[in-house]
Image: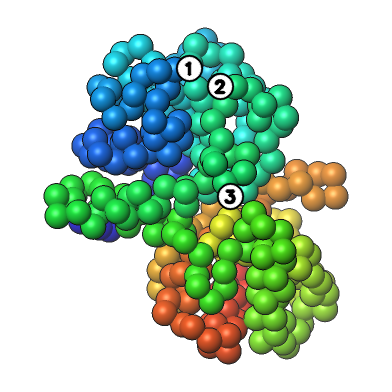
Amino acid sequence: MKDLFKKLMKFTEQKEDFFTECLAATLREDLSLARMFLQKMCGPDVEGVKIADSHIDIETQLLFPGSCIDMVFKLNNKISVGVENKLWSPEGTDQLSKYLKLPLNALCFITGYHCTISPDVSKNPRYLKPSNGRDHFMWQDFYEDVHMCVEQETCLCLTHSLLGLFEHLGFESPHAEIGDLLDLNEDIAKQNRQNFAKLWGPTQQGLRERGWKSISRGSIAELYVREGSAKRLQWAWLDPIWQRGSLRIRLKFHLGIVLSDIVKLLETSRNTLCPDIEVIITTARRDGKVVEVIDILVPMRKLFDDLSDAEPISQTLSNYTLAVFDTVG
């Protein structure tokens, strides 16, 4: 049952909506986990209503005039806590500001990646923030709660499946050898990124051997790959810091290349690359223009498995990255 949600997710293009429904179904079934989620977001109570003693209802895709919010927790049918869920897509234009005007007692924003929250949202007393100083929650903040419930003898099937989906999407704690590249302590984050940058050596060599002339650094641990001779691929961005615990490879193709064909090609090569990749067609801003790109995400804990030394991690990183380039080039 652990792979249920993971397997079903492959059959939908609406992955964020699917994730929300999986989460909501699990929390409805596992009241203990639902209380943990709420307490992680809100603390022990919301406007004096104790979460531990409350009757909890959960609605998804709840419509308001001009808005549709992903999930709403209702306590004792009178307190409403809204939750906007993101896996990879960015916040919509003024989305959180609009939601804070809705008849909600509190609003939580949870993402799979680190993002910047506008000051007017962050300072709003109804906007919920984690105690670690970040301006929004990330799914990794809830991983230990899900894992703890799975460890119980009374673990429910959907909770086990939700844990599998969290792990598939890279929402675990960072790989021990790599550390947290987005640590809130800037000195720790910088040191971890510097260490990760050293792992790119074999990858850079392999890219040069494949004819890529420009390979440059960004934010210490990222690589930008340009000026190659590939027939389809125009440039790539190798990014281990966009989503905590995951490696993102962003690919931009030459004009005339059908991105859905590339996605199919990557899907059929999944077992060769890594079974846990997620392939997404999205947009990016480049030289003042919005362009379509393909993002390939893989959890680094899955990619590097139980490796604990820099050399085999570096070689595995190279093998995976170069296989992606060879597949789509």
Residue 37: x %, y % from top left: 38, 38
Residue at the disc numbered 2: 126
Q: Check contact, mark 1 vs mark 2: CB within 8 A.
A: yes
* Residue closest to the far left: 154
Residue at the limit of the structure toward the right, as seen here: 287
Residue 9 drawn above or below residue 228: above
Asked if disc 3 and disc 2 are in contact, CB closer than 8 Å, the reply is no
Say which of marks 3 and 2 sits in front.
2
Number of numbered markers: 3
Label 2 CA crowd tier, 10 Å (few <14, some 14–19, many 20+) = some
Q: Earlier in the sequence, mark 3 or mark 2?
A: 3
- Disc 3 from disc 1: Cα separation: 25 Å
In percent of the image, x 46 and y 25: which residue is there?
A: 82
Left or right side of 198 for 139:
left
Report the amino acid beneath label 3.
Tyr
Marks 3/2: CA distance? Answer: 22 Å
What's under tag 2, amino acid-wise?
A: Arg
Q: Could you say whether the residue bearing mark 3 is in a helix, strand or loop?
A: loop
The residue wearing badge 3 is 113
Relative to the observer, which residue lies in front, 224 or 37? 37
| Coloration of the structure image | rainbow
Image quadrant containing the N terminus: bottom left
Q: Secondary structure at mark 2?
A: loop
Residue located 38% across and 54% down the image = 144
Q: CA distance from mark 1 to mark 2?
A: 6 Å
Residue at x 58%, y 89% (from the top left corner)? 311
- Which residue is denoted by mark 1 in the rendering? 105
Location of residue 272 in the rendering, given as x and y in whole percent from the top left corner: 44, 77
